[in-house]
Image (spheres, helix red, strand yellow):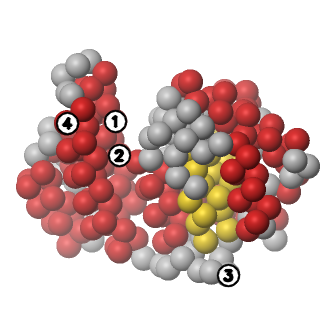
């Protein structure tokens, strides 16, 4: 596989898109391609943190990534099903990152889940309300910065306070999220990437069936 992550991180848009098209035509795994793109965005974020990149570079990288996602999404296969397993997704309050969440949402839809995407910086009560309204039994919480860990825990606690904790499985994910964070927050599962998240959700769905 070409170094899509480096091409994206270097903002080499024409060459990046050309090689992405080649990968898709060759039949490379679209989920793996998205993970490669996500890795490129991680590199962009680090360059911004070290002041090598500026806001304009972040915007350009995000636009390139969005174009890549639009190209890859149709190749994931499957269709969202109104009668499929429902999952509420969102980036927790205090965090406005959406790239990882968008990849996960695309893959969930491709695997037949009905995705209720609440967006970013989502208040804890909004997750609770969405579960009440939809009847979803799965919740996916995304966090890309360590200061958002408190938001994950607060959301889990909000479900407990609403008397809904026992009826939902809460999955968490994002760059810095790990098993230690899962224990701290009281979530049911943690995923290192989009494929792991979908597989974990499917296993939870079978348990609830």
Separation of disc 3 and disc 1 at Cα?
35 Å
**Sequence-wise first label, 4 or 2:** 2
- Badge 2 is on which residue? 38
> Which of the two marks, 1 or 4, is nearer to us in this view?
4
Any mark on residue 42, and which? 1
Image position of 83 with respect to 205: above or below: below
Image position of 26 with respect to 9: above or below: below
- Badge 3 is on which residue? 83
Separation of disc 1 and disc 2 at Cα?
6 Å
Q: Considering depth in this image, is 162 or 191 the residue closer to the camera? A: 162
- Badge 4 is on which residue? 56
In which image quadrant can residue 24 be found? bottom left
Marks 1 and 4 close (CB-CB < 8 Å): no
Mark 3 secondary-structure assignment: loop
Marks 2 and 3 close (CB-CB < 8 Å): no
Separation of disc 3 and disc 4 at Cα?
42 Å
């Amino acid at each position: 596989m070409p170094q899509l992550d480096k091409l994206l991180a270097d903002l080499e848009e024409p060459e990046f898109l050309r090689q992405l098209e080649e990968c898709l035509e060759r039949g490379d795994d679209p989920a793996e391609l998205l993970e490669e793109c996500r890795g490129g965005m991680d590199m962009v974020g680090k360059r911004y943190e070290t002041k090598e990149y500026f806001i304009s570079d972040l915007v350009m990288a995000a636009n390139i990534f969005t174009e890549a996602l639009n190209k890859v999404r149709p190749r994931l296969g499957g269709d969202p099903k109104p009668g499929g397993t429902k999952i509420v997704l969102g980036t927790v309050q205090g965090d406005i990152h959406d790239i990882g969440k968008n990849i996960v949402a695309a893959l969930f839809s491709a695997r037949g889940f009905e995705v209720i995407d609440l967006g970013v910086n989502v208040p804890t009560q909004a997750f609770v309300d969405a579960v009440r309204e939809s009847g979803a039994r799965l919740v996916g919480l995304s966090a890309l910065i360590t200061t958002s860990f408190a938001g994950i825990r607060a959301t889990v606690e909000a479900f407990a306070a609403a008397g809904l904790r026992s009826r939902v499985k809460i999955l968490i994910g994002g760059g810095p999220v790990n098993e230690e964070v899962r224990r701290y927050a009281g979530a049911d599962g943690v995923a290192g990437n989009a494929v792991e998240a979908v597989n974990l959700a499917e296993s939870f769905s079978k348990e609830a069936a």
